Amino acid sequence: MQSKGSNTRLSGMASRSRIPTLLLFMFAAFSSIYVAGRLWQDSENRVYLIKELDRITGQGQSAISVDDTLKIIACREQHKKLAALEMELAAARQEGFDSKHSTETTGTNSKKRPLIVIGILTGFGRKNNRDAIRKAWMGTGAALKRMEHKKGIVVRFVIGRSANRGDSLDRSIDSENRQNDDFVILDNHVEAVEELPKKAKLFFVHAADKWDADFYAKVNDDVYVNIDALGTTLAAHFDKPRLYIGCMKSGEVFSEKSHKWYEPDWWKFGDKKSYFRHASGELYVISRALAKFISINRSILRTYAHDDVSVGSWFIGLDVKHVNEGKFCCSSWSAGAICAGV
């Protein structure tokens, strides 16, 4: 049996142990109330600030949400990945001018993006030139299709219509096209020497709308093109989204009406009568972004007496990378050259 003294000690110890416990509970309760009050006050402050921001800006939401911030971060990451893929694409195309990264997939169908669309501007009575080009570097039939599918290089002769629509000139071109299937016929353009700048513009418009290529080129029908050298050169420029490459020059502006190269707008080029720097018309290449720019702004782009001057004028005020490439100078043939006059 326990003694009376021991019972008294146990009762006293139990009483003393309940007092700290009670104080602890009270402290915890007051702390919870305090924290909850501060959180509620902070929440009210945030709601008030957001409402004030909405009232001042006149917007129904905060300036930028967490979701929007995450989207911006994701876009930046995608931009870095895209830059890396473009570098891989440039290296891969040096081998065959094609790459798995240039394949666009829509549903179950995949479509390879062409490396370049080349428009050879030609005219009536130039069949001998066209046949020479077909034999020398363009190819016909299966060879032409193979170059498109294997190397991603699309080549077409570009011509308009006769002033006397449906005459023997038009019928001759239609017959030649049925035989070779290698023309872009601009039905809304009338063939004339003075209309060549408009013809060049219409080609870029048509090509940009029909083919989603990386590059677009204009070539004269008396020029030989080294396709392999062209592809290798362009592969080094995939990092330039707005590229304008060619044999850059700055020729004289002629104000005399009797001159062969008379420029009606000669006065716009200043007292020295010299054109701004532009690529020679024998062969020049522009990137997809610039071709799309021409297509979108076709109705307001001014043309001058020459197609190469006109094209160069469209890019003067844009953030465009002008590349003066000696390999595009067709007047001289050298090792590694891209073109030569024939």
Image: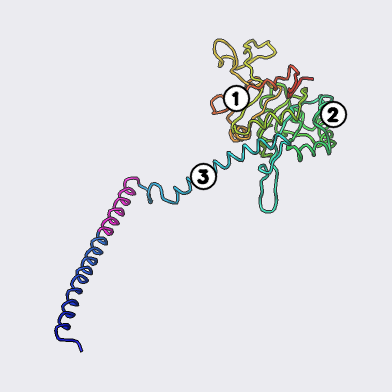
Q: Secondary structure at mark 2?
A: helix
Specify the label residue 322 is tagged with.
Answer: 1
Disc 1 to disc 2, how far (Cα)?
A: 32 Å
Kindly identify the amino acid type of the residue bearing the numbered disc 1.
His
**Which residues make up the magenta segment?**
38-57
Sort mark 2 into few (<14), some (14-19) or many (20+) by Cα contacts within 10 Å: few
Q: Read off the residue under disc 2.
A: 135
Circle 3 crowding by C-alpha within 10 Å: few under 14, some 14–19, many from 20: few
**Measured from the top left, where is residue 261 in percent x and y?**
68, 14
In the image, 81 versus 328, the foreground residue is 81
Q: Is residue 303 a member of the stretch shown in magenta?
A: no
Report the amino acid beneath label 2. Answer: Lys
Tell me the mark number nearer the camera, choosing from 3 and 2: 3
- Asked if marks 3 and 2 touch (Cβ < 8 Å), the reply is no
The colour scheme is rainbow
What residue lies at 15% left-to-right and 82% top-to-bottom? 8
Is residue 55 found inside the magenta-colored segment of the image?
Answer: yes
